[in-house]
Image (tube, helix red, strand yellow):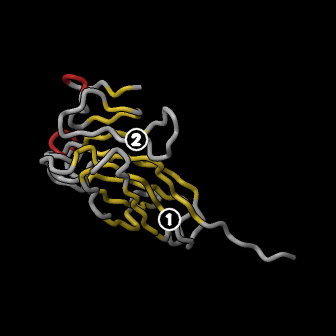
Amino acid sequence: TNCNLGPAGILVDGEYAVTNLVTNPIPAYRNPNDHSAIVDGRFLAINPSNNLVGSNSIIWARRTIEVLPNRDIEISFWAYNLRQTGSAGNNPEIQIELLDGTGTILNSTVVAEIPKNTNADDWHIRTITFNPGTNTNVDIVLRSNQPSDDGNELILDDIQANQLAEICNQT
């Protein structure tokens, strides 16, 4: 379905939508094609707002994920900056966090900013590897790391967390 939020149907500060189209976009926006090339596929359109929800706002989280201790977890996602090259506004930056069951940060990394798009297929993958240590349950949190509300609109797709299974010897 179309994203019809805020005045004139635009994605306003502090709002998000799971959608396949950001309707009636501001002139700086360009709607992307679905990253996975799925007909009527959906993505997460986000306009984080430091003014409305505070700095480093959570833009996505998955809680209480069961993991194997001491085995790397690869976290990845595809991101698209709604703003076109040549338009004003800051590029989105995302901080990825791995938390233990009490909410203590085990690992935290800011990935490279998402550059303004050059076309409707200008998706960028971001991947990071964290080790959960002895923890068997973790949270994965994505935060906006861009301190400005000028720009920072983005779309996320295909968010994944993978961990290689333990390999047992054959008996």
Nearer to me, 117 or 141: 117
Q: Quadrant of the C terminus?
A: bottom right
- Examine the rendered structure and indicate whether residue 159 appears above or below residue 110: above
Q: Position of residue 167 (x, y in %)?
A: 71, 72
Name the kind of residue labelled 1 in the image: Glu
Would you name the residue on which mark 2 appears?
A: 33
Quarter of the N terminus within the rendering:
top left
Outermost right residue: 171
Is 27 situated left or right of 5 in this image? left
Dot label at residue 74: 1
Depth check: 167 or 36 in front? Answer: 36
Residue 155, horizontal then vertical, whole percent: 34, 44
> Closer to the N terminus: mark 2 or mark 1?
2
Residue 86, horizontal then vertical, whole percent: 15, 50
Q: Amino acid at mark 2?
A: Asn
Residue 31 at what x, y percent from top left?
Answer: 32, 38
Contact (Cβ within 8 Å) of mark 2 with mark 1: no
Q: Mark 2 or mark 1, which is nearer to you?
A: 2
Callout 1: SS: strand
